[in-house]
């Protein structure tokens, strides 16, 4: 019985070792690839331009609102309560509009970023798939992911960058 247990353990170890050696595992630093791509740099520039334009519009609206509020506060003592209440409602409505414009600007920027990232992600994934198939990698992990606990496999980042012409 004891010899049978030893033999069984030895067989399991041989198969486990053979299986582990048969798998080719690599890691790739996707963040590094993203920051190296000219498409990403162009997208960042476009987003910065859009953000600057939206910020300018919001600042202009905000300055206009502040000027109007200062004017109304200055004139409040000489106006009737009805006029002051109407002006207060007008200011509140303008503040609400400004907040809506801010939310819309943030949404526009996020949508533009998402639309720009989609083709870049597809290009990177296609390059990773091509490099993985060519090198025979069975698994490729993102080295920049916090889920990666131990990184001792081959790093495919240079090959993917080469495939992308970076």
Image (spheres, rainbow, N blue to C red):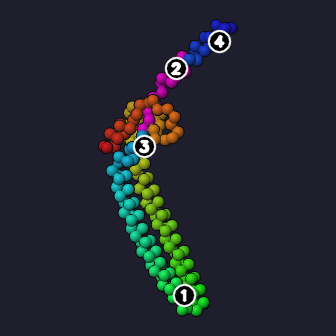
Q: Position of residue 8 (x, y in %)?
A: 62, 14
| Marked residue nearer the N-terminal end (4 or 3) | 4
Image height check: is 129 above or below 153?
below
The Cα atoms of the two marked residues, 4 and 1, are separated by: 95 Å
Q: Is residue 65 left or right of residue 157?
A: right
Q: Position of residue 81 (x, y in %)?
A: 60, 90
Count of marks placed on residues: 4
Which region shows up in magenta? 14-28
Disc 2, SS = helix
Q: Nearer the viewer, residue 121 or 157?
A: 157
Count residues near mark 3 (Cα–Cα under 10 Å), then give few for <14, some for 14-19, many for 20+.
Answer: many
Residue 164 image-quadrant placement: top left
| Marked residue nearer the N-terminal end (4 or 1) | 4
Q: Which residue is mark 4?
A: 5
Contact flag, marks 4 and 1 (Cβ < 8 Å): no
Residue 30 is marked as 3
What is the magenta segment's predominant secondary structure?
A: helix
Q: Which residue is mark 2?
A: 17
Residue 76 is marked as 1
Magenta run includes residue 22 = yes
Disc 4, SS = helix
Count residues near mark 2 (Cα–Cα under 10 Å), then give few for <14, some for 14-19, many for 20+.
Answer: few
Magenta run includes residue 144 = no
Image height check: is 55 above or below 42?
below
For the question of whether residue 47 can be seen, the reply is yes
Residue 134 is marked as none
């Amino acid at each position: 019985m004891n010899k049978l247990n030893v033999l069984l353990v030895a067989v399991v170890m041989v198969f486990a070792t053979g299986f582990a050696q048969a798998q080719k595992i690599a890691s790739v630093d996707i963040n590094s690839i993203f920051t190296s791509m000219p498409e990403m740099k162009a997208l960042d520039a476009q987003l910065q331009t859009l953000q600057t334009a939206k910020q300018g519009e919001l600042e202009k609206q905000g300055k206009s609102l502040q000027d109007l509020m200062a004017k109304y506060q200055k004139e409040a003592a000489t106006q009737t309560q009805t006029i002051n209440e109407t002006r207060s409602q007008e200011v509140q409505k303008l503040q609400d509009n400004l907040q809506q414009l801010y939310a819309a600007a943030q949404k526009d920027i996020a949508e533009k970023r998402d639309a720009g990232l989609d083709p870049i992600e597809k290009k990177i994934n296609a390059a990773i798939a091509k490099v993985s198939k060519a090198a025979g990698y069975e698994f490729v992990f993102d080295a920049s992911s916090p889920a990666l606990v131990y990184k001792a496999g081959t790093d495919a980042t240079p090959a993917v960058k080469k495939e992308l012409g970076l």
